[in-house]
């Protein structure tokens, strides 16, 4: 009886020690995870962040991620500068460049990009404007074009269309509506004549009789670096390990996304699984069977390993400077930190 009690006691002690060791290891692991906030839009093009989260790639890199969602690019840039968001993926805007000029923000990689052979951003017209003669982008002179804010990517696209078609960009009436949802409503109701947007939104709009396709942005900006990865200057310059870990996890998410829905090399089951994952964040208010086609339609290339088209980013910067939307003295080195990814 005494012997059994001792064995039981020893077993209990050993079990307690193992439990304490396991709990201690778990606490150490939890303590080691860096809490970061990632800015995103509820677009298919932001899928790499969602994939990295849902498949544990951020966690594997020791990152405890929380998402903060936005409805336009410029507020996200402000949130990065204020420290409310640690990393973001969105289009270059005047706000982002101005904050970079103040030493607050750095672009550190590339994400969504127009690529020949892969359907990209679509130029749209309201049915009323189309019936009145706006049947192609060369007829945009004198018509209205929806943007979120002055200095947004939509503003840049409108300028590039005008430039190639040979008329002054001032001949397009830009209508700032602050949020993507407001632009959608204005286009469908005929309050604005035109817009350009990523395919998962554009194709959904084209299912309605109020909207017509009149062109493709790739015909005007063939290698457009649509979105970039950016962070605070503090992260980029003083926290290289944290920044590299974020980029690695994001790149793994991009690889999965491209294989499933862009290159379609991973098989149909992988594509279905990817659509279900993205649906958690995109068109979540719709049943999966209603959202699936729109999610698939939004599958534009996300650059492998965050590679950045620096040539196009320079073109964007030059345009912002020429328009007087940012300081004429800002350099590409002020905007972009090239330490983290390949550029071309």
Image: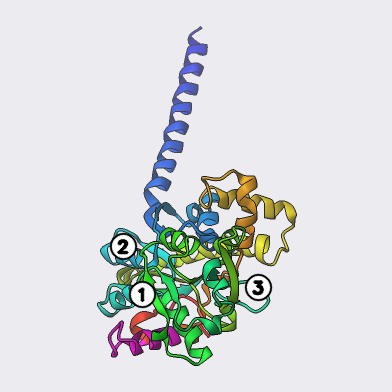
Label 3 environment density (alpha carbons within 10 Å; few <14, some 14–19, many ≥20) = some
Q: Nearer the viewer, mark 1 or mark 2?
A: 2
Q: How far apart are the alpha carbons under marks 1 and 2? A: 13 Å
Which residue is painted at 43% across and 47% down in the image? 29
Please tell me whether residue 116 belongs to the stretch shown in magenta.
Answer: no
Q: Nearer the viewer, mark 3 or mark 2?
A: 3
Q: Position of residue 334 (x, y in %)?
A: 33, 83
The residue closer to the viewer here, 287 or 192, is 192
Q: How far apart are the alpha carbons under marks 3 and 1? A: 28 Å
Which numbered tag is attached to residue 326? none
Q: How far apart are the alpha carbons under marks 3 and 2? A: 32 Å
Which residue is painted at 48% across and 27% down in the image? 15
The answer to whether 309 appears left or right of 264 in the picture is left
The answer to whether 155 appears left or right of 343 in the picture is left
Q: Which image quadrant for residue 132?
A: bottom right
Nearest to N terminus: mark 1 or mark 2: 2
Residue 151 sits above or below residue 45 on the image: below
Label 2 environment density (alpha carbons within 10 Å; few <14, some 14–19, many ≥20) = some
Q: Position of residue 112 (x, y in %)?
A: 53, 71
Q: For the residue labelled by badge 2, is the local secondary structure a helix, a strand or a loop?
A: helix
**Residue that badge 2 annotates:** 79
Residues in magenta, as a range:
314-331
The residue closer to the viewer here, 340 or 332, is 332
**Residue that badge 3 annotates:** 118
Please tell me whether residue 327 belongs to the stretch shown in magenta.
Answer: yes
Nearest to N terminus: mark 3 or mark 1: 1
Label 1 environment density (alpha carbons within 10 Å; few <14, some 14–19, many ≥20) = many
Given the current orientation, which residue lies at the most extreme top position?
1
Q: Position of residue 91 (x, y in %)?
A: 44, 71
């Amino acid at each position: 009886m005494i012997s059994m009690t001792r064995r039981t006691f020893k077993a209990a002690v050993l079990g307690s020690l193992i439990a304490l060791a396991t709990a201690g290891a778990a606490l150490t692991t939890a303590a080691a995870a860096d809490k970061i906030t990632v800015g995103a839009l509820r677009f298919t093009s932001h899928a790499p962040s969602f994939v990295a989260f849902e498949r544990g790639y951020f966690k594997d890199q020791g990152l405890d991620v929380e998402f903060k969602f936005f409805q336009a690019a410029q507020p996200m840039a402000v949130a990065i500068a204020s420290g409310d968001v640690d990393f973001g993926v969105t289009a270059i805007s005047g706000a982002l460049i101005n904050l970079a000029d103040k030493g607050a923000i750095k672009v550190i990689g590339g994400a969504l990009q127009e690529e020949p052979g892969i359907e990209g951003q679509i130029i749209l017209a309201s049915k009323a404007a189309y019936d009145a003669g706006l049947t192609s982008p060369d007829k945009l002179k004198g018509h209205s074009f929806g943007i979120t804010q002055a200095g947004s990517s939509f503003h840049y696209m409108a300028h590039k269309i005008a430039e190639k078609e040979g008329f002054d960009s001032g001949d397009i009436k830009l209508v700032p509506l602050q949020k993507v949802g407001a632009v959608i409503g204005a286009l469908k109701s005929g309050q604005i004549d035109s817009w350009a947007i990523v395919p998962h939104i554009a194709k959904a709009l084209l299912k309605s009789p109020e909207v017509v396709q009149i062109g493709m942005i790739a015909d005007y900006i063939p290698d457009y670096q649509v979105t970039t990865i950016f962070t605070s200057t503090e992260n980029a310059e003083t926290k290289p390990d944290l920044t590299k870990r974020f980029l690695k996890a994001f790149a793994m998410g991009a690889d999965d996304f491209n294989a499933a829905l862009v290159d379609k090399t991973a098989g149909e089951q992988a594509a279905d699984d990817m659509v279900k994952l993205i649906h958690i964040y995109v068109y979540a208010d719709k049943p999966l069977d209603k959202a699936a086609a729109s999610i698939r339609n939004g599958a534009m290339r996300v650059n492998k390993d965050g590679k950045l088209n620096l040539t196009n980013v320079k073109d964007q910067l030059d345009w912002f400077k020429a328009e007087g939307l940012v300081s004429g003295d800002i350099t590409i080195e002020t905007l972009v930190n090239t330490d983290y990814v390949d550029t071309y």
